[in-house]
Amino acid sequence: MMETTFDVYNGDDSAWLYRGWVMTGIDPVAGGINNWHNPWGLSGIPSRRGQLATWGWAGSLHPGGSNALYGDGSVRFLKETTSKVVLYKLNFMADGGIVSADSY
């Protein structure tokens, strides 16, 4: 489970509960962490901090990353620079794989 923001480009989001058809869960692999929306997609145009591009993306207003709740009940801060490979591996349950804490 990961944090998300309420402000999303294509509508309001719910940060904690399933409440409707667009609440599909958080997929940090799809958009990374803190991938803010740039309304014109142009380089040189600052993104609107706090507004994610779409539902289901991970993000928070914490500088540099977002908190994630692990299956063992621990909460860890994941940097927005965490590679998508590491985020992908963290999404597997009971696969026997090991993801080093040094990886993120």
Image (cartoon, helix red, strand yellow):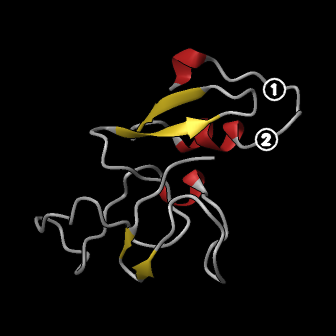
- Position of residue 33 relative to residue 74, above or below, is below
The answer to which of 64 and 69 lies nearer the viewer is: 69
**Residue 73 occupies quadrant:** top right
In the image, residue 64 lies at what x, y percent? 31, 38
Give the residue at x 39% y 38%: 81
Residue sitting at x 10%, y 64%? 44
Q: Label 2, on which residue?
A: 92
Report how many numbered discs are placed on residues in the image.
Answer: 2
Residue in the image at 88% along x and 33% along y: 95
Which callout, 2 or 1, points at the residue further toward the start of the chain?
A: 2
91 left or right of 61 in image: right
Residue 54: mark in rendering: none
Kindly state the secondary structure of the residue where label 1 is placed.
loop
The Cα–Cα distance between marks 2 and 1, rounded to whole angstroms, is 8 Å
User: Residue 70: percent from the left, percent from the top?
Assistant: 67, 33
Give the amino acid type for the residue marked by disc 2 in the picture.
Answer: Phe
Asked if the residue at tag 1 contacts the one at tag 2, i.e. Cβ–Cβ closer than 8 Å, the answer is yes
Three-letter code, disc 1 = Gly
Q: Position of residue 25 (x, y in %)?
A: 65, 62
Q: Is residue 91 above or below residue 55?
A: above
The residue at the far left in this view is 44
* Label 1 Cα neighbours within 10 Å, binned few <14 / some 14-19 / many ≥20: few
Q: Secondary structure at mark 2?
A: loop
Q: Which residue is mark 1?
A: 97
When the figure is inspected, residue 71 is found, relative to residue 11, above or below; the finding is: above
